[in-house]
Amino acid sequence: MSYTLTGKHLIAGEWVAGEQTFQSEPAHGPANTFPVGTPAMVDQAARAAEEAFWSYGYSTREERARFLNKIADEIDARGEEITEIGTQETGLPEARLNGERGRTVGQLRLFASHILAGDYLDRRHDEALPDRAPLPRPDLRLMQRPIGPVAVFGASNFPLAFSVAGGDTAAALAAGCPVVVKGHSAHPGTGEI
């Protein structure tokens, strides 16, 4: 493996370490030391996401699609490292983690293609039934603009697809919302890489 875990948090483009640490409990291999995030670090990450919103939130669909595809390319390029770290941390078979990596890349590329195609534009989402009782039919309107930074909390059973890059993270980035990700403590190395 060519990537060496730093055991730090990436906040506003800088690797930041806290004073308190914990030892990971990987399924295989040696434990690693990771910092415990502090409330001040969370505030710092939230402020950075808020600042990024004013440029990223108003970027074009094409720019956001390029960004999502670039993330997908990077995950593809680092696939063996991601699989190795994920296997050590979770004990899941390589085939399962390779599949999850493919799913993550697919999710990123799917959202990139949707925002490029613009097939969601001018849609109105209104599932209310006209004979709904006791309330009258509400008038629902869909606003297609980013709402601001989004917090994503990693899932324990999917180290990559729903924890750091795919799923909610990909959807938020596609919509123009900067993301603060809190990876799951069961697989901190997968979140870092």
Image (cartoon, rainbow, N blue to C red):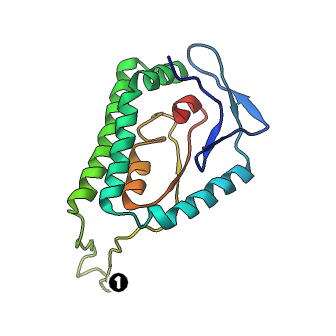
Give the side of residue 88 with respect to residue 67, left or right.
Answer: right
At a point 59% along the width and 13% down the height, the residue shown is 29
The answer to whether one can see residue 137 in this image is: yes
Find residue 23 and report its horizontal and vertical position in percent.
70, 25
Find residue 31 and report its horizontal and vertical position in percent.
65, 19
Give the side of residue 140 with respect to residue 83, left or right.
Answer: left
Find residue 34 and report its horizontal and vertical position in percent.
68, 31
Given residues 26 and 77, the one toward you in this image is 77
Q: Which residue is mark 1?
A: 134
At a point 34% along the width and 63% down the height, the residue shown is 60
At numbered mark 1, what does the secondary structure look like: helix, strand or loop? loop
Give the side of residue 184 with respect to residue 126, left or right.
Answer: right
Instruction: Please tell me in which quadrant of the rendered image residue 97 appears.
Output: top left
Q: Residue furthest top?
A: 29
User: Is 191 situated above or below 98?
Assistant: below
At a point 28% along the width and 80% down the height, the residue shown is 132
Q: Residues within 10 Å of mark 1 (few under 14, many from 20)?
A: few
At a point 41% along the width and 38% down the height, the residue shown is 161
Find residue 103 and report its horizontal and vertical position in percent.
32, 36
